[in-house]
Amino acid sequence: MSKPLENVEVALFVTCLVDINRPSVGFAAVKLLEQSGCKVVVPNAQTCCGQPAYNSGDKQSTKDIAKNVIRAFKSFRYVVAPSGSCAGMIKKHYPELFADDPEMLLEAQDLAARTHELVSFLNDIADFEPDDVKLDKKVTYHDSCSSLREMKVKDQPRELLGEVDDLELIEAEDREACCGFGGTFCIKYSEISEEMVDQKIANLLATKADIVTAGDLGCLMNIAGRLSRKGHKMKVLHVAEILAGMGDKPGIAEGRD
């Protein structure tokens, strides 16, 4: 039986953090999309989604960046990002940015309608199931704010992780609480952010899981950095890496000490 997206062109919005800090997440995303039958394209003209400027109140710079992203992804039926945060920026905030510009508003709304977070796209649209993937580990999933609250991603990663052979999913007490990253929040309010991530890792460690995973690299880098600085050995992986059978690779921040 053919797959629902057989040979359908899908554009991958790689994201800055994946490109600079964890390219393996991008390769995992390509592998998963190709296993779903999609033809993956990575437009060269893509840039940052503009979220740092947006969160800093620089509306004009955000608009300039958004216009470039809209142009770069104009011709694709689907745009997929391995990040609820960047996908949320495009889907929720681009239309708000151009509310006073009727022509650009239509283009922003068009891109928003075609943009999806990776795991929800795989589960809800591509009818994807992990292909002979095994991971004999206890795993806990952190719900990032943007994935959960903006993109409504909650059950999809859990359903797909449930298809990984031998993987045991253990829920943390505060799985839906913010980790304290929040883009520029962790810089503007570092002391509050530090307290939040300390509480987050305390609850993650209480699960006694081997691995913590999520769909947003910003959260994972924040959690991994704190775990590393505190001397804890819990492994940190993006959910795409687990689903793509890359669960045995070194975790985020491993090997830095």
Image (cartoon, helix red, strand yellow):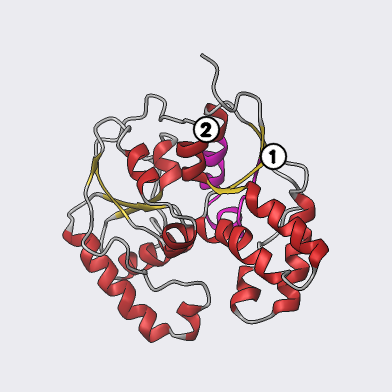
Does 18 sit left or right of 49 as displayed? left
Q: Residue at x 31, y 65 (%)?
A: 227
Tell which of 152 and 228 is nearer to you. Answer: 152
Which range of residues does the magenta coloring cover? Answer: 11-31
Work out whether mark 2 precedes mark 1 in sequence or the reverse, and give the earlier one. 1
Specify whether residue 246 is in view: no
Q: CA distance from mark 2 to mark 1?
A: 13 Å
Answer with the quarter of the image where residue 4 lies. top right
Identified by mark 2, the residue type is: Ala
The residue sitting at the top extreme is 1
Does 52 sit left or right of 44 as displayed? left
Question: Please, what secondary structure does the residue beneath circle 2 have?
Answer: loop
Q: Residue at x 33, y 65 (%)?
A: 228
Q: Residue at x 27, y 56 (%)?
A: 234
* Residue that numbered label 1 is attached to: 77
Q: CB under 8 Å between callouts 2 and 1? A: no
Tell which of 130 and 116 is nearer to you. Answer: 116
Examine the structure image and report whether residue 94 is included in the region drawn in magenta.
no
Q: How many marks?
A: 2
Q: Within 10 angstroms of label 1, few (less than 14), some, or many (20 or more) residues?
A: some
Identified by mark 1, the residue type is: Arg
Quick one: quadrant of the C terminus?
Answer: bottom left
Q: Residue at x 32, y 67 (%)?
A: 177
Question: At which x and y percent is residue 55?
Answer: 59, 76
Q: Which mark is residue 7?
A: none
Answer with the quarter of the image where residue 208 lies. bottom left
